Amino acid sequence: MAHDVPIDRELDLKGEVCPYTFVKSKLVLETMKPGEVLRVIVDHEPATGNVPRSMESEGHRVLSVGPAGERTWEIIVRKKE
């Protein structure tokens, strides 16, 4: 977990499924400054693989992916600089 990294924004996407999990994450990242960190919360397990892969293909850095509770996961992403 990347909890030692300050989180600039948090996005709760529980109830959303792919590809909306990535699309909504990308839209929030576009409003953030380079280097800022976004924490995305998902409850759709395929998103734990799809969102990080898509973020990295966009040039962002995935800091961590891990459990955030029962049947929820967090994806920590640093916006590309």
Image (spheres, rainbow, N blue to C red):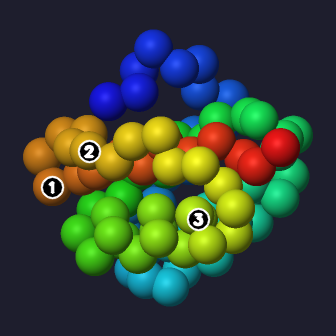
Identify which residue is drawn at 77% across, 35% down.
35
Q: Which amino acid does label 2 sit on?
A: Gly
Residue occupying the point 28% across, 76% down = 46
Label 3 crowd (10 A; few <14 / some 14-19 / many >=20): many
The answer to whether 3 is drawn above or below residue 47 in the figure is: above
- As measured in the structure, the alpha-carbon distance from the residue carrying label 2 to the one carrying label 3 is 16 Å
Front in this rendered view, residue 31 or 65: 65
Q: In the rendering, at what x and y percent does residue 69 appear?
A: 19, 40
> Which residue is labeled 2 in the image?
66
Q: Between marks 3 and 1, how big is the CA–CA gap?
A: 22 Å
Q: Name the residue under label 1.
A: 71
Task: Measure how far apart labels 1 and 2 are at the Cα level.
Answer: 11 Å
Q: Is mark 3 on a helix, strand or loop?
A: helix
Which SS class for mark 1? loop
Dot placed on the residue nearer the N-terminal end, 1 or 2: 2
Residue matched to label 3? 55
Residue occupying the far top of the picture: 4
The residue drawn where x is 64% and y is 42% is 78
Q: Residue furthest bottom?
A: 19
Residue 38's quadrant in the figure? top right
Residue 2 location, x and y as percent? 41, 27
Q: Is residue 72 visible?
A: yes
Of labels 3 and 1, earlier in sequence is 3
Asked whether 42 or 15 is in front, the reply is 42
Left or right: residue 51 versus residue 70 is right
User: What amino acid type should be assigned to the residue bearing mark 1?
Assistant: Arg
20 horizontally vs 23: left or right: left
In front: label 3 or label 1 = 3
Q: Which mark is residue 41?
A: none
Marks 3 & 1, CB-CB < 8 Å contact: no
Quadrant in which the C terminus is drawn: top right
